[in-house]
Amino acid sequence: MQLIDTHVHLNFDVFQPDLASVRSRWQEAGVVHLVHSCVQPSELVSIQAIAQQVPELSYAVGLHPLDAQKWHSQTAEEILCQARADSKIVAIGEMGLDLHKANNYEQQCIVFESQLAIASQLNLPVIIHCRNAAPQVRAVLEKWQETTQAKIRGVMHCWGGTPEEIQWFVDLGFYISFSGTVTFKNAKQIQSSAARVRSDRLLIETDCPFLAPVPKRGERRNEPAYVRYVAEQVAQLRSETVEAIAAQTTQNACELFGLVL
């Protein structure tokens, strides 16, 4: 059984002491590839260093909405040049809107739209962070596609919304990725979403080191090996085998990010 963890943050300090052991565990769990997200372009050097040790790692470059205030006149060119220079960059992001922890909506929108333009120019998918902002993210995407007449593809990562909202983004051509939150006892809305999303738009992730799934929820650090628990929960919710979920989500990840295993 092969699994792909489509959203990790291995460059965080919490992984520095024992990354080799962490890698051994994800290999034992059947994780054959990982997509490393990016919070800000300056992270790219540390992500590239990890990729030299971990050949099964692809990655993105972009600016997180909670760092929107760090966007400056040269940021777009910086991201564009980085993505053109490195063939292991398979996406732009993570980008999007976060109205839970910040209220600089207009600035976030500017940064979001600027990165959509970069992804379109490079024909790369986007990784979207959306927290308490599904209607606003939908509005930005619809406006951008109507204005540019260009389709954008990508993933709504760490899904936390409703089944109705899922349909908005599937209709726009997006994949929906579920993290360890789908295993939480009271996450009924997320579980309902996981049960209903189209199989050809389904992805799984850990978002490690955050959001460790049940039965590891009490641990301070999530890690890629635990994506198997996400796959098992999604399989149970959909009345499918974990092998079927693994095969489908692996195929979907390869199609979205252009991965060759």
Image (cartoon, grey):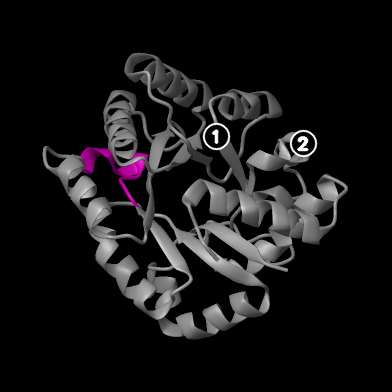
Q: Name the residue carrying label 1.
A: 174
Q: Residue at x 48, y 52 (%)?
A: 258
Q: Residue furthest front?
A: 260
Q: Residue at x 55, y 48 (%)?
A: 255
Other-residue count near label 1 (Cα within 10 Å), few / some / many at <14 / 14–19 / ≥20: many
- Front-most of 252 and 102? 252
Residue at image location 52% in from the left, 30% down from the top: 132
Q: Earlier in the sequence, mark 2 or mark 1?
A: 1
Residue at 66% across, 80% down: 28
Label 1 sits on what residue type? Phe
Numbered badge on residue 58: none
Split into 4 quadrants, where in the image is the N terminus? bottom right
- Could you say where residue 43 lies in the image, as x and y percent from the top left? 28, 60
Left or right of 15 on screen, residue 122:
left
Determine if the magenta segment contains residue 259. no
**What residue range appears in magenta?**
61-70
Residue 103: horizontal and vertical position, in percent?
A: 36, 29
Predominant secondary structure, magenta span = helix
Q: Is residue 223 visible?
A: no
Q: Is residue 67 magenta?
A: yes
Residue at label 2? Answer: 192
- Cβ atoms at labels 2 and 1 below 8 Å apart: no
Q: Image height check: is 9 above or below 236?
A: below
Residues under labels 2 and 1: Cα distance? 18 Å
Q: Where, by quadrant of the figure, is residue 98 drawn?
A: top left
Query: Which type of secondary structure does the marked residue at label 1 adopt?
Result: strand
Whether residue 23 sits left or right of residue 84 in the image: it is right
Task: Between residue 202 and residue 64, name the one nearer to us.
Answer: 202
Q: List the single residue furthest toward the left.
A: 73
- Labels 2, 1: front one: 1
* Quadrant in which residue 245 is drawn: bottom right
Residue 112 vs 179, above or below: the answer is above
